[in-house]
Amino acid sequence: MMKKMHILLVLCLVVAGAVIVGGCLSADNDKDLNNVGMTSFKSEKELKNYLETGSTSGRSVYGSTNYAKSSGVAPEAAPEPMAMDAMTEDGGGNSGGVDYSKTNVQIANVDEADIVKTDGKIIYYTPGLYYPTNVTLHDDSKYPYYTYDTYQITLVINAMPAETASIISQIKETGGNLYLADDLLITIATGYNESKIIAYDISDPSNPKVMWEQSYEGYYVDSRLIEDKLYFVASEYGFGVFPMMYMGKELAYADCYYPYGPEIIRPAADITYYVTKLDVKTGDVDDTKAFISSYSTTIFVSGDNMYLTNYYYPDTQIMFLDFVESNGSNYLSSDTMKYVKKVMGYDLSTRIKYMAVSEAIGNYTSDLTEDEYTNFYDSFYKDYNAYSSALIIEAEKTTITKINLETFDVVSGVVPGRINGKFAMDEKDGYFRVISTVGDDYRTEESTLRSIVNILNAEMETVGTLDNIATGESIQTTRYIGNTLYLMTYTDGDPFLLIDLSNPESPAVLGEMKLQGTYSYIYPISDTLLVGFGYTGDWRDWRTKLSLYDVSDPANPVELDVFYFNADEYVSVYDYHGFTWNAAKNLMIVSGSDTAYVFEIKDGQIKLMKEDVHKDSYVVRSAYIDNYLYVFSNKEIHIYNMTNWQRVQVIPIEQPVYPDYGTIYPTHDEPIYGTHETPVYG
């Protein structure tokens, strides 16, 4: 019994730090932890070998053929990358003297897809509603049921004059990702069976006409509109078959990129991202590149470049084998170590070696006395923990692949640690600025947690570093404004840091203040004023707050005012498209749960001006045109005169009507409930 317990405890110790993944440990395993990056295939032979074997230099690729195409079964969709909640509003638009809101975006003049777009005259809105179509009753004699498809609608609203605003047409299509480009409305459908981009001629908004369509493979990830070019990113599980085609364009082997690095840090390689540039006037594909990466990839787009991240982390099985091979003689018998060396010399997969070495350790410890085993366990665990913790901190890397949006040339760089969302990245004057976190892992001590600012030049070489920022603390939100990085972290007495980036070679801390509460959104309303949005209190007294900060003296930022929402008011801070700033009227509109909150931020004070409640429906967006505010939910659109805050119009939205299952059950002498058969509802 004691022997079995010894084996079980050792295996638990090892498995606790191990993730089962495939791959081979080559005899000439490269240990240079800085030799990481993205590179294109150098020849057709190299690309074909990668597809056939699923690896280069032992690197693992999951699904080396296009699963959806080969099996006809759609894999689980890749989630859209999560965004940290800080952004730059792309200002208000102005057309013929009419002031109107534009989509809140991260970078000015780099438009992002959203569910509401306006040109100051017409509003285009895709509610989060799905309408049944092709409804079919399957009249089974015992258990009838319905099947149906669904579609979304994009409403075309004649917004002015506001008092008579109305829906003048509808576009029936899976939408929700909208762009306006002069007289074109671009919609991006995101369903796997409806994966297409459609451009509508809206010169007559009451009668939109299809100008062009472009189908795409895979799942929609992200997009940007810059002038007359649409930059589009989609993903597929695994890697496509060769020769590879995307949107009708054949990709050369040199257009396909994969991650490389030493085996002990294994970049995930389970997703292929396709980055495509399209002409919005014609729908023609200008260029496409393919990048093998992972679900955790984050995308940042400046006006000139697109950046894709890829996170590297130690392969815990290789890490364990490396530790045992190098240090095992301190804990194990000579016979056991001979066996370990023998196993490590074989051309076997990492998993098989790991299983064999684990079993050998279990066999060794099964012959130990209770005291001997306790001593072994304590020393082995202590030393391995220290080794793995140090290696994790040293080996955590993120590669950043830069794509020039004009030429589609590609270059990559590397920074230590993990990048927490796209708002941790920025670009200015040809320099890429990024803040990353090292040591945020359960195996490492809290004291090792730290953040690092890195500044990279156009060739993605690091030219400036600021290390040991907010040690022991995690980043809550970041915001780049000009040459200043505003950083809020999470700990007791949460720090608000201002970091000077004006000298790329020597970033430095400008100032710091202590906050109460956590913040996940920072918004600049002027050159010297910021709004912070977040929470205060603990789980028993959790309240949303809105704060106003004066940063005119960077060394001494000051909180001017704070507004606390009621404890029972849920206000989301995670969708930055749900915030609107009207600079001309000093108004900020925040989309809450079923309420839009309108604040006047003026003269150093925050004042609640209006609460617009939508019964039984979430408020999702707001927009303004001249003196009128439009508030959108899935049931209604409310329009207010912002002079007197009187509601001047309500536009109802047609609701979907689904089949009524209660009307189709047949009459039986006895109830069908309790039988072993279950009706099938389509």
Image (tube, rainbow, N blue to C red):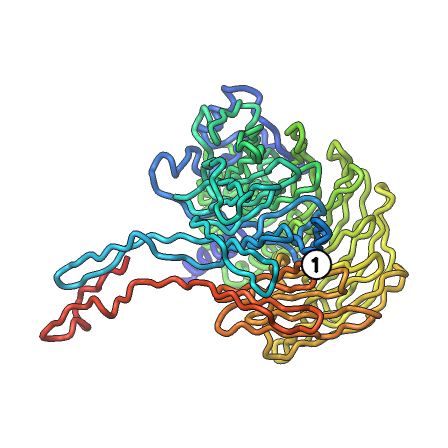
Q: Is residue 436 visible?
A: no
Q: Residue furthest left?
A: 669
Q: Residue visible at 53% across and 72% down?
A: 614
* Left or right of 398 in this view: 61: left
Rendered residue at 54%/59% (across/down): 372
Instruction: Determine which quarter of the picture holds residue 465.
Output: top right
Nearest to the observer: residue 441 or residue 205: 205
The C terminus - image quarter: bottom left
Q: In front here: 366 or 183? A: 183
Residue 130 horizontal/vertical position (percent): 41, 57
Residue 277 versus residue 656 in the image, above or below:
above
Q: Nearer the viewer, residue 134 or 37?
A: 134
Where residue 347 sits: x, y (%)?
47, 31
Q: Which amino acid type is shown beneath numbered disc 1?
A: Thr
User: Taking 103 as reference, is 204 left or right?
Assistant: left
- In this rendering, the answer to whether 519 lies above or below 670 is above
Name the residue tied to disc 1.
Answer: 477
> Does 495 sit left or right of 380 as displayed?
right
Confirm whether residue 354 shows in the render: yes
* Percent of width and height locating residue 477: 70, 58
Provide residue 115's location: percent of width, then percent of height: 55, 54
Q: Quadrant of the N terminus?
A: bottom left
The residue at 64%/46% (across/down) is 111
Q: Residues within 10 Å of mark 1 (few under 14, many from 20)?
A: many
Asked where in the image residue 203 lies, by quadrant, the reply is: top right
What residue sits 70% from the left and 67% below the top? 518
Q: Secondary structure at mark 1?
A: strand
Would residue 293 appear left or right of 641 to someone viewing this image? left
